Image (tube, rainbow, N blue to C red):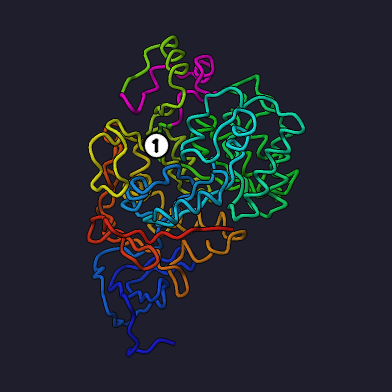
Amino acid sequence: MTSSQDSFALVIRGGRVLDPESGFDAVADVGITGGTVSVVSATPLRGERTIDATGLVVAPGFVDLHSHGQAIPEQRLQALDGVTTALELEAGITPVGAAYARAAAEGRPINYGYSTSWALARMAVLAGAPLEGPPDTVLTHLGVPAWRAEASAAERARIFEHLSRDLADGALGIGVLAGYAPHLDPAEFVAVAELAAEAGLPAFTHARPLVEADPEVPVDGAEEIARVAGQTGVHLHYCHVNSTSGRQVDRVLGLVERCRMEGAEVTTEAYPYGAGSTAIGAAFLAPEFLARQGIRPDSLVLVGTGERIADAARLAEVRASTPGALALLHFLDEDDPALERALLFEGTAIASDAMPLTWTDGRPDPLTWPLPPGALGHPRGAGTFSRAIRRLHRESGKLTLSEAVARCSLLPAQVLDEAVPALRRKGRLRAGSDADVVVFDPARIADQASYVDGTRPSVGIEHVLVSGTAVVCAGSLVPDALPGKPVRA
């Protein structure tokens, strides 16, 4: 019971408070002490410090399940988009213990966490990739054919040793980049799923290609997810269902819906853009693969140089010379209804697939702010969540504000909260939840990043708190704020 005499370390005063879990939606004060929300009160509260939220929305901080941009500069851009927790789950990393230790030593502006990486374990065992190398080792090795080869029984055992050790060390699940090794034995995917199921954790999956895109694939990517979820009982998370489904999204979502009705646990995520980004050497960016999808080489743009790939010969040349270079892939018109259907599918979480920045003038000190010239990236790393609220709520009215906020906060937290207790305190705004809070102007919130300027921060995000510490204050980044904490299983 809270009396009018109680005082809190911080009070967010007079905003429209949204808690998507309980449905609470009213003007109220939020009292915060010690990194935790103490109370949400319809009567005024006293605080040592106050934030005036009159006319603003006060909501749980956004949770990004799919963020490859895990360094300080990338996380700052995400904080300015309302994100308070950014997790690397699709690709993952190994060893996770070293990744958590590195992030803790450097500090992070927002919360962080990792799955273990099936792809990187394979790269280490089959292609000699360094496990203590830079964080972008997975991206730089995607175009190396050796990691996609069939593994012997002994090699597979070594791969699974990496995964098992990481699961024991707090990994949030297993990241499975099946789409980057599209012709591997399906039995290996089943074995990975069984390992995740045994640990009681999800497998975060970039699906194999659909048969429409690659008729020679050993199993259709969507059907494999449905089949393996039912066969093993694993929770399979279908990463960026928009980009891996493209114009086949209705077939894929129908399959997911039937799978759920039969009792399998398959969750989905999507981002509100018609272009993806990955290493130019990825298997599915080979010229012949693009042709099967009806995509031309000039749909690809190199992030570092801005070069639009002219033809198949140039694509082959770039893939051979710089296979780890990041590229944008324009796969769908952003007004195509298929993209909206992916975003609005029942239970779909918003997730950015944020990429590491490309630095054309050398990597600066990570604490440098504002970002210096030469920082390039996909706009989803800076604008995904503001864009989702702008498009799905304010402009189209397809979602209520509470529904849009839920897809950015509660739904992604619920993907993990059965297996990861720390997520039960995130994505909600109620007494006892973590004080990870975003305060935004519903009339102004919008993305500003574009394919030309991918690092332009969003607008309308007025305050962002991580464990009660301000990371964004009055619309500006707080440069010395590094309160991010690890999220571990």
Q: Is residue 93 left or right of residue 33?
A: right
- Crowding at dot 1, Cα within 10 Å, few <14 / some 14-19 / many 20+, comes out as many
Q: How many labels does the image show?
A: 1
Residue holding disc 1: 273
Q: Indicate the quadrant where residue 27 lies.
A: bottom left
Q: Position of residue 466 (x, y in %)?
A: 38, 63
Q: In this rendering, is residue 122 above or below 1?
A: above
In the figure, is residue 426 to the left or right of 361? right
Q: Quadrant of residue 9?
A: bottom left
- Image position, residue 478 (x, y; %): 26, 58
What amino acid is labelled 1 in the image? Tyr
Magenta-tinted stretch: 278-305
Q: Where is residue 47 in the image (x, y as percent from the top left)?
A: 29, 80
Residue 444, magenta (yes or no): no
Q: Is residue 236 left or right of residue 366?
A: right
Q: Does the magenta stretch include residue 301?
A: yes
Which element carries disc 1, helix, strand or loop? Answer: loop
With respect to residue 16, does 479 lie above or below?
above
Residue at the top extreme of this rendering: 313
Work out whether residue 346 or residue 153 is closer to the camera in this orientation and state it: 153
Residue at horizontal 38 percent and vertical 54 percent from the top = 83
* Residue beneath the point at 73% across and 40% down: 191
